[in-house]
Image: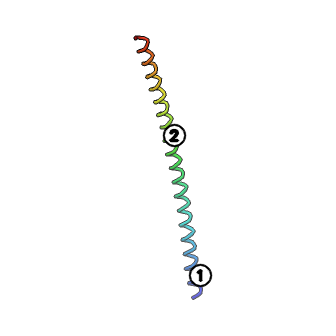
Amino acid sequence: MMGRNTLESDIRRDNSHAADIRKRQKNAYDAEEGAKKVDKFSEEAQFSSLDFTLINQLIAERKATRNEDD
């Protein structure tokens, strides 16, 4: 009878260990995917910032051109 309890205990321990490994793998995958999203958003933010800079520059040039025409 003692052997059966030991076997069941070993199985529970192994299952728990396997669950921990799966959890760590999922966390690593989630972290990697999160880093990719951050990189993508950072890149998009850089383009947006560049767009606003160019738009502001165009507005300033048009204002200057209008002032010269007046």
Closer to the camera, 55 or 1?
A: 55
According to the image, label 2 marks what residue? Answer: 42
Name the residue at 57% across, 73% down: 13
14 or 32: nearer the viewer: 32
In this rendering, position of residue 65 left or right of residue 4:
left
- Up the image or down, 39 lies above or below 5; here it is above
Residue 6, image x and y in percent? 59, 81
**Residue type of the residue flagged with mark 2:** Ser
**The residue tagged with tag 2: helix, strand or loop?**
helix
Hey, which residue is sitting farthest bottom in the picture?
1
Q: Label 1, on which residue?
A: 6
Question: Could you say where residue 18 lies in the image, as x and y percent from the top left?
Answer: 55, 67
Residue found 51% across the figure and 45% down from its top:
38
Q: Which of marks 2 and 1 is nearer the N terminus?
A: 1
Q: Which residue is drawn at 57% across and 71% down?
A: 14
CB atoms at circles 2 and 1 under 8 Å apart?
no
Q: Number of marks in the image?
A: 2
**Coloration mode:** rainbow
Placement of 50 over or under 8, stated as above or below: above
| Residue found at x 46% / y 21% | 60
Residue 8 falls in which quadrant of the image?
A: bottom right
* Quarter of the picture holding the C terminus: top left
Checking the image for residue 51, the label placed there is none
Front in this rendered view, residue 62 or 40? 62
In the displayed structure, 29 sits above or below 5; it is above
When the figure is inspected, residue 6 is found, relative to residue 29, above or below; the finding is: below
The percent coordinates of residue 15 (x first, y second) are 54, 71
- Label 1 Cα neighbours within 10 Å, binned few <14 / some 14-19 / many ≥20: few
Q: What residue type is labelled 1?
A: Thr
Query: How far is the residue under mark 2 from the one under mark 1?
Result: 53 Å
Front of the two marks 2 and 1: 2
Instruction: List the single residue furthest toward the front.
Output: 70
